[in-house]
Amino acid sequence: MRLARGDRLDWRYQSSESLTFNIHYREGNAELSPVVRERSTNDAGTFEARLDEDYCLTWESGPPGAIIGYRILLRPAVR
């Protein structure tokens, strides 16, 4: 999703199996991940964009897979 500097992204998830969650963006050939959660089944937080970028939210589970419930709320910066 496209975020502008100062936008806030509230996120929450729960999973039936342990997984890895991250929020990342690309800078040239590099993939930068300001938020990383490893081996978790639930988490929540707020991410504030420092740059105008396209950000990706990714959940990765192991071979058995997982059932994931999530909520994402974009709170635009006051301009």
Image (cartoon, helix red, strand yellow):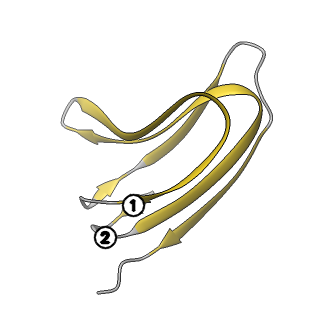
Q: Position of residue 33 (x, y in %)?
A: 35, 37
Q: Nearer the viewer, residue 27 or 7?
A: 7
Q: Position of residue 69 (x, y in %)?
A: 76, 47
Vertical position of residue 46 compared to residue 74: above or below? above
**Quadrant of the snapshot with the C terminus:** bottom left
Residue drawn at the location 21% of the way across and 29% of the way down: 29
Q: Position of residue 27 (x, y in %)?
A: 21, 40
Question: Distance between the Cα atoms at labels 2 and 1?
Answer: 12 Å
Residue drawn at the location 58% of the way across and 56% of the way down: 11
Q: Which residue is mark 1?
A: 2
Q: Residues within 10 Å of mark 2 (few under 14, many from 20)?
A: some
Q: Is residue 50 left or right of residue 19?
A: left
Vertical position of residue 54 compared to residue 60: above or below? below
Q: Nearer the viewer, mark 2 or mark 1?
A: 2
Q: Can you tell which mark lies on residue 75?
A: none
Q: Position of residue 75 (x, y in %)?
A: 48, 74
Vertical position of residue 6 compared to residue 34: above or below? below
**Quadrant of the snapshot with the N terminus:** bottom left
Q: List the single residue furthest toward the left.
A: 28
Residue drawn at the location 36% of the way across and 53% of the way down: 54
Q: Which residue is mark 2?
A: 6
Residue drawn at the location 64% of the way across and 27% of the way down: 19
Q: Secondary structure at mark 2?
A: loop
Q: Tell me the quarter of the picture where residue 28 sits.
A: top left
Q: What amino acid type should be assigned to the residue bearing mark 2?
A: Gly
Q: Secondary structure at mark 1?
A: strand
Q: What amino acid type should be assigned to the residue bearing mark 1?
A: Arg
